[in-house]
Image (cartoon, rainbow, N blue to C red):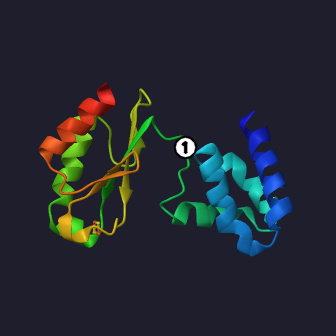
Amino acid sequence: MQQEETTRLIEEWTQVHGRTRDRLLPLLHMLQEEIGFVDDAAIPAIAAALNLSRADVHGVVTFYHDFRRTPAGRHVVKLCRAESCQARGGAAMERAAADRLGVAMGETRRDGQVTLEPVYCLGLCAIGPNALVDGRPVARIDAAALDRIAQEIAA
Ligand code: FES
């Protein structure tokens, strides 16, 4: 079912946008937006559509952190791992987030409620450490903010 949907989306999209190799990133972004992730099962269809090798497609999907390879949880918490946020206590906030949310970095909690992911600079460097919670920026994240986020997710 999922694979049929993926194949249909690829076919429709390439009819409009073309099948050249330079279409790979836009096609991956479209799939991520429509389906929510780009899993291994989609790679052969993408490769065939753009006349690329499966290794080429796999390499791109795994290189870019933005492409999710499994479905996300209902809520997505992203913590900034870039330099300024790290200098402002980002690593400690990462440990605290994993503890309070009950999920390791890069994972989705077993109940599917929350995914914890890294992000690399949100452009708010001077007021870090920073997070994105379901797309909403949260600056100067601290233990109290993490407690509030954990309560929101549990509600
Ligand atoms: S380094 Fe975290 S927002 Fe820029």
Q: What residue is drawn where x is 83% and y is 68%?
A: 18
Q: What residue is drawn where x is 44% and y is 31%?
A: 112
Mark 1 CB lies closer than 8 A to ligand 1: no
The residue to which callout 1 is attached is 70
Residue 37: image location, x then y, percent: 58, 47
Question: Amino acid under label 1?
Answer: Thr
| Image position of 5 (left or right of 81) | right
Mark 1 burial class by Cα count in 10 Å: few <14, some 14-19, many 20+: few
Q: Is residue 131 above or below residue 24?
A: above
Q: What residue is drawn where x is 30% and y is 63%?
A: 81
Helix, strand or loop at label 1? It is loop
Residue 2: image location, x then y, percent: 71, 37
Farthest residue to the front: give it.
136
Dividing the image into four equal quarters, which quarter contains ligand 1? Answer: bottom left
Residue 99: image location, x then y, percent: 22, 38
Q: Is residue 38 visible?
A: no
- Front position in the image: 97 or 147: 147
Give residue 85's quadrant in the image: bottom left
Q: Is residue 46 above or below residue 7?
A: below
| Image position of 90 (left or right of 68) | left
Quarter of the image with the N terminus is top right
Farthest residue to the right: give it.
15
